[in-house]
Image: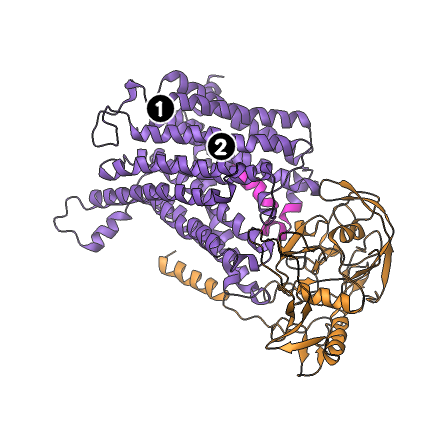
Amino acid sequence: MQFIQERLNYLFKSTKGLILLAIAMIGLETALFGMLSGPMADFGIRDIVVKLFNMDLVQAEREGRIIILYHSIAMAVVAIEVYMVTGLLKMKELYKVTSRILVTIGYLMAMIFGMGFAYWGHLWPLHGLYIAGLTLIFFAGLFLAIGLWPWNKAVYQSDKTYSRTKNGVDIERLAFFATAVTTLISAYFGAIPGSYFGNGFEVFLAENIIRYPEKTTMEYSIIGHLHIMLALIAIMLTLIIGRWMDFKGVLHKIAMPLMILGTVVLNLGVWGVVTPLEPVAHMIIYVGATPSMLAALMLVIFGWNKLIRTGISGIERPTAWQKFKALGRDPLKFGPLWQMVFMNFTVSGIGIMMAVKLDEIFRLWPAREERIELTGHWHILSAIIATIILLYYGDMIGLKGRVRRWYGWAIIILSDLAFASMTIFEMKRLFISEAEQQPLVNTVMLLADFGLGMLLVILAMVMIWRLLDLFKKKGRWTVEVDQDDLAMKVEL
Amino acid sequence: MRPARCYLILAIIILTACTSVDLEAPIPIYDPGVDPESWVVIPAGEFLTGQHNDSKLIDYDYEIMVTDVTVAQYLDFLNVALADGTLKVSADSVVGFYPGDEFQGVKHEIEITAADYIFIPLNDPASRFTFDGTKFTVKQGYENHPMTNVSWFGAWGYCGYNSNRLPTELEWEKAARGTSDSRPFPWGEEIARNNANFYSSRDPFEDMSSFGSRTSPVGFYNGQVYDGYQTLDSASPYGLYDMTGNVWQWTGNVYEGQHYRYMRGGSKDTYDMDLRIWVRNNATPTYFSPGVGFRCARGGE
């Protein structure tokens, strides 16, 4: 009994245990439900999985299933961010513990009961429990936001190398706070129309109505919600990575106000879609996105500069090659920042190009092509977020030496191979006709599946290793269980 | 494995993307025995429409073609209409007159004025015909395949030339679904690979390692066995074939505030989810593709 109690204590009470559990749950869900679509359906694996697990996949309910699937994965990611924020920033124990308890119960309920409802017949009490799970996550966010309150003198920033006001208010903390609060408000933009459309399961996917010239307020709200929530998850993760890297100095002082400005304006733009501001909402969103992306760029410059300086310390006159090698010496530190840069090619760049050339190019193609481009680029953004978390997690659990390098570079190379392939797939109509596309499609799908598949294999290996570790009396978990502060490293 | 070997393997894989596609590869020739000239009457009455089964009434009888318009049928039209001056060759396409649509100036809306518009392209390698400057001829084996690479104007023009019209979306949906239930596919609740021609459905016309999916003859999925390939009888409740899969089908609605034209039914190039009856696709009316065709309707105006 004590054996189980100690392990549960680790998994549900320690920062690193909670993160491990959430990653494992996402990994399991992705592996299982990823077998239901795309090439897995082509190969006939979907049929086997459906029969093996006795799933009930009603054709008319596909869109609803997918929405619940997206939400259940996203909630686990939100939970990971809550654990990271509460592990990195000072806050009262009450808010830290409460937000963690609520978000953990919430995402597990949303995942287990939501997926049960969506894929194994419509047992409505499960839907109720799924909604209850989402609600708990909202309340976790409330406690987190209160805990992050930046005008509490106990959390003022005394170190002048960080972004702060004259009287000491921590601007970085304010950025965390602004992101948390706007996330809570933006959740309503999904919750309200979700209640409306979900009543009777009459749901739709936003990408399917994108060309309708007239959309209802509820429909606009859904479109705004899905865009902003992913953006906010990405912004929060950027702040987390900044704290992990100990982002400070002049760039920090410029970046943090920009991040706050960007986050607020971005949100105002999205909220504007349900107001008379709708015609200019996109312009407001662009205006908001720019400072946020500039702030992220400053983090990248700071982080890479720091990696280079650390890597060449001791070398009197480092050459450019030595600096370059120093930059990539630690893939777990280099990777998250590189993924942010790579995102510009596969997500932001594509999005901007689509917006600029929408009527000239993209809307001359059928709506189904536009759907591929839209869903492709936000799937890539979601996956980039996941890889950044995995890279940070690798550092968090103290991977060292060759394992650290292989784990880090494998995540970076495999994921970028997949993302680049998917980007070519999305944009293929720019350079190849429908009749001649099959060899190209085969190749990019193969590379994308290989990249993502191998990524899941690596994740599975890490998870199995961590599972086996849990059976050891003096395993790594026994050290991690007391490491509530994420700045602490495992030394084994 | 050494990095150099990894790069070599990757380079070889990427090079396979540059393989050229033989669009003239021989195609199996089958006669499903379904008459492309046949029509059925869809009687007036209520039916369930859309994903969420809203009850709708179509208060008139109308007729609709049992199959998509075939390449042979369309080329007959082209030859006659070119000869009588209804259509003309302009640059690398066949064009015909369209009287234009009311323009609302809505965001993203493009004005469709009264003018000549493309019906079909002449030099697209994916087209299933040849043109010697005066006469169109079907490429061998494609006579009974659905006409593709035809724009919405080309579909509208064909139906109109024969005093018919394109079906509205609602008419199309009723003809595909019938009135007795809320089935997602014309033949019932579930889809198997031999119900219809869709992406990677492993029919005799596809080769996913080279040219990918190709059209199948109209009425192919009628329960017959073709050289050992067993099809399921996939007619709609009214006896229509290929209502889903094979080619997207242009429909006739011109909606206020948008220039897009809507298509139904999914195609040889889409996953099975797009073959669900309520799924819509749309494109500009000048768009043409080897995966888009049409059928006509008449009556009820």
Membership of A38 in magenta stretch: yes
Q: Which mark is residue A484?
A: 1
x then y, percent, for residue A138: 50, 25
Magenta-drawn stretch, dominant element (helix, strand or loop): helix
Q: Residues within 10 Å of mark 2 (few under 14, many from 20)?
A: many
Q: Secondary structure at mark 1?
A: loop
Of the two numbered discs 1 and 2 on the same chain, state the one appearing first in sequence. Answer: 2
Q: Chain letter for purple?
A: A
Query: What residue is shown at x 55% (from left), y 53% (from top)?
Result: B108
Which color was chain B given?
Answer: orange
Name the side, left or right, on which A8 lies relative to A372: left
Q: Which chain contains the residue that carries disc 1?
A: A
x then y, percent, for residue A187: 51, 31
Q: Which mark is residue B297?
A: none
User: Quick check: B277 above or below A29?
Assistant: below
Q: Nearer the viewer, residue A42 or B69?
A: B69
Q: Kindly identify which residue carries mark 2.
A: A186
User: Quick check: B297 above or below B122?
Assistant: above
Residue type marked 1: Asp
Q: Is residue A403 visible?
A: no
User: Quick check: B270 above or below A261?
Assistant: below
Magenta segment, which residues?
A28-47
Q: Quadrant of residue A465 in the image? A: top left
